[in-house]
């Protein structure tokens, strides 16, 4: 029995589920969660969807988005909890999950088998691909609403089909989701052409500190920048890609000061450098081309610590 069959067997044996994903959710976390809730509903199951952080503004128009409850605790009893894109219970920042029968579905190369049942497939282009396969294996019709959530997840987690290992298979999945009812133009406009002014102001602050060294580029924002721009945490998403877009740059980093004086680091690569190796050294994780983690500040020292690792691992 393969891992997909094990997950499906556990779902079929139960009726009531709790669904969650990692803190600071991205498009794959949100889209996959919402699609999974629709699939479980089609299977006649009940599912409560919770997250420790609010849904980012750009994902609020997604179908089923109003199902997500913002909380840091498990409320009530559930027969099982399904965690998407987590390498541990702690990654969700949800307290009380330890009491549940845990099922983990993850596609990160840094994924860990922490649950009772673990389905980890680093070959999947997004967690959404695994949720899609689960739905098909369960005999569920992929409705336009489910397809919209899954397409959004695939689009964002592949960097608009620019990250390795995007392949013909990735486009086959995208084509199938469009045939199932996802509107690629409307979804792309919702994701990429609806940024708040605060994000653009924050981008200006980050670009004003752009620095280059060999094939590496980095930007940073301080707590003062965040306050001055009236920016939310979600406004930081994707800013690192502006540094990666520079000709000749292979690794880009975005540093952000956190209220607790730590520094959050987002890393991106064009494929020649596996940034998940760096993230793993600092307790983080992710993909070969997109990873993240947090380190102790202050900001200048944090930047230098990461640069030393980059220089040692990937000399120019």
Image (cartoon, rainbow, N blue to C red):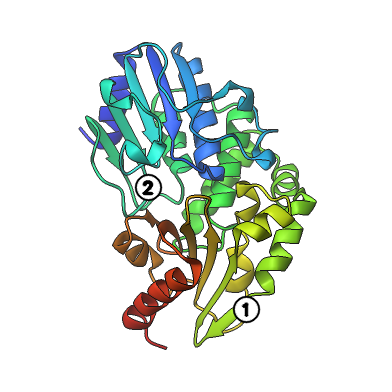
> Relative to 53, is 121 above or below?
below
Q: Is residue 276 left or right of residue 261?
A: left
Q: Earlier in the sequence, mark 2 or mark 1?
A: 2
The C terminus: image quadrant:
bottom left
> Relative to 35, is 174 above or below?
below
Mark number, residue 297 = none
Select label 2 or label 1 by which is in front. Answer: 1
Pick the residue in front: 250 or 22.
22
Quarter holding residue 280: bottom left
Q: Is residue 15 left or right of residue 251?
A: left
Q: Is residue 269 visible?
A: no
Q: Is residue 183 visible?
A: yes
Q: Which residue is mark 2?
A: 107
> Relative to 72, is 15 above or below?
above
The residue under the point 51% across, 43% down is: 24
* Percent position of residue 263, x then y: 47, 59
The N terminus: image quadrant:
top left
**Separation of marks 2 and 1 at Cα, in angstroms:** 28 Å
Q: Is residue 4 left or right of residue 294?
A: left
* Percent position of residue 156, x then y: 58, 50
Crowd rating for badge 2 (residues with CA inside 10 Å; few <14, some 14–19, many 20+): many
The residue under the point 70% across, 43% down is: 187
Residue at the far right in the pictured view:
197
Mark number, residue 246 = 1
* Percent position of residue 303, x then y: 46, 72
Pick the residue in front: 65 or 5.
65
């Amino acid at each position: 029995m393969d891992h997909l069959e094990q997950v499906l067997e556990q779902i079929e044996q139960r009726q009531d589920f709790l669904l969650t994903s990692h803190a600071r959710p991205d498009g794959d976390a949100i889209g996959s969660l919402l699609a999974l809730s629709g699939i479980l509903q089609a299977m006649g199951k009940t599912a409560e969807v919770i997250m420790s952080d609010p849904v980012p503004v750009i994902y609020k128009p997604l179908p089923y988005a109003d199902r997500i409850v913002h909380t840091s605790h498990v409320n009530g009893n559930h027969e099982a909890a399904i965690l998407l894109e987590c390498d541990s219970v702690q990654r969700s920042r949800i307290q009380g999950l330890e009491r549940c029968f845990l099922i983990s579905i993850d596609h990160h190369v840094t994924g860990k088998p922490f649950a009772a049942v673990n389905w980890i497939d680093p070959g999947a282009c997004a967690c959404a691909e695994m949720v899609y396969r689960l739905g098909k294996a369960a005999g569920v019709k992929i409705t336009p609403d489910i397809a919209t959530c899954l397409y959004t997840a695939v689009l964002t987690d592949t960097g608009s089909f620019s990250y390795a290992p995007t392949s013909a298979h990735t486009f086959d999945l995208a084509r199938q989701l469009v045939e199932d009812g996802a509107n690629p133009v409307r979804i792309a406009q919702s994701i990429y052409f609806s940024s708040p002014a605060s994000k653009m102001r924050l981008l200006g602050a980050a670009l004003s500190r752009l620095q280059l060294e060999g094939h590496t580029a980095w930007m940073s924002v301080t707590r003062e920048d965040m306050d001055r721009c009236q920016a939310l945490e979600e406004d930081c998403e994707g800013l690192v890609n502006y540094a990666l877009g520079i000709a000749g740059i292979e690794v880009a980093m975005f540093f952000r000061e956190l209220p607790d004086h730590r520094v959050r680091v987002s890393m991106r690569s064009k494929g020649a450098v596996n940034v998940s190796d760096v993230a793993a050294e600092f307790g983080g994780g992710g993909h070969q081309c997109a990873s993240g983690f947090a380190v102790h500040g202050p900001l200048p020292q944090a930047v230098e610590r990461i640069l030393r690792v980059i220089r040692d691992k990937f000399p120019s």
